[in-house]
Image (cartoon, grey):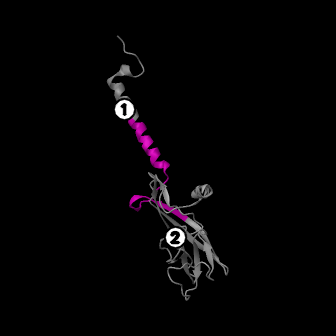
Amino acid sequence: MRVILLGLCLCLPLSTPDFLPPGYSAVRHELVLNWDDNVDTRFVFSPSRRNYGYHVITRGKPFPFWKSGYYGPHIFAVPPNAVLPDPKETLRGSPWPCALVPVHEVRSVPIGYPVVRILTTLRVTAMREDGFLLEVVEEERFGMFDLPVGPVWLPLLAIAGVGFLLLLRFNVAIAKRKPWAVGTAPVA
């Protein structure tokens, strides 16, 4: 019994459960795939819902991204006239060329961090017989109301600057009212 409990305790840090840890908020991670007009194929993301299903990708349109399963999600290059299996099945093991998604999923951020949604844009760079190559073009982070989130240090620097100016103004106001209070002792 102790061996089983010890084994479970050792496996806990390796698991990635679907619930959020305390002190974190959820993030919606989405991908956008772009490719050249001369590519005559349709791209399919699989598995799309945790460990099953697939999603037919529309060029330039965001789709949800999950790191599904142990091996991670793949994007398959399916011929335009090929028949896809049942939507509940994955395309793993299919004869079509595929590429591993070169992005790490972000599921959560610490509470107080302004990111609500992450949009990663991918591009198909080369099509070959045995597969194709994907590259990350850009990653955008959005906050509340879908406004872009810039560097975190910029708002902090602005708040510190305003605080410094207010403190300076407050000290000048005290010096005008009580000149003896600024570095000198009162004279009797």
SS under mark 2 = loop
Q: Left or right: where does residue 55 sit relative to residue 165?
A: right
- What residue do we see at 42% from left, 60% from top? 147
Residue 69 x %, y %:
57, 69
- The correct choice, above or below, for 102 with respect to 81 in the image is above
Extreme residue in the front direction: 1
The x and y percentages for residue 154 are 47, 49
Give the mark nearer the N terminus: 1 vs 2.
2
Q: Is residue 144 above or below residue 126?
A: above
Q: Secondary structure at mark 1?
A: helix
In this figure, which residue is indicated by the disc labeled 1? 170
Query: Over which residues does the magenta segment extend?
Result: 138-166
Residue, disc 2: 50
Name the one closer to the observer, 173 or 127.
127
Circle 1 crowding by C-alpha within 10 Å: few under 14, some 14–19, many from 20: few
**Which quarter shows the C terminus?**
top left
Label 2 neighbourhood size at 10 Å, few (<14), some (14-19), many (20+)? some
Question: Where does residue 180 sit, x and y in percent of width and height?
Answer: 37, 19
Q: Which mark is residue 117?
A: none
The front one of 70 and 99 is 70
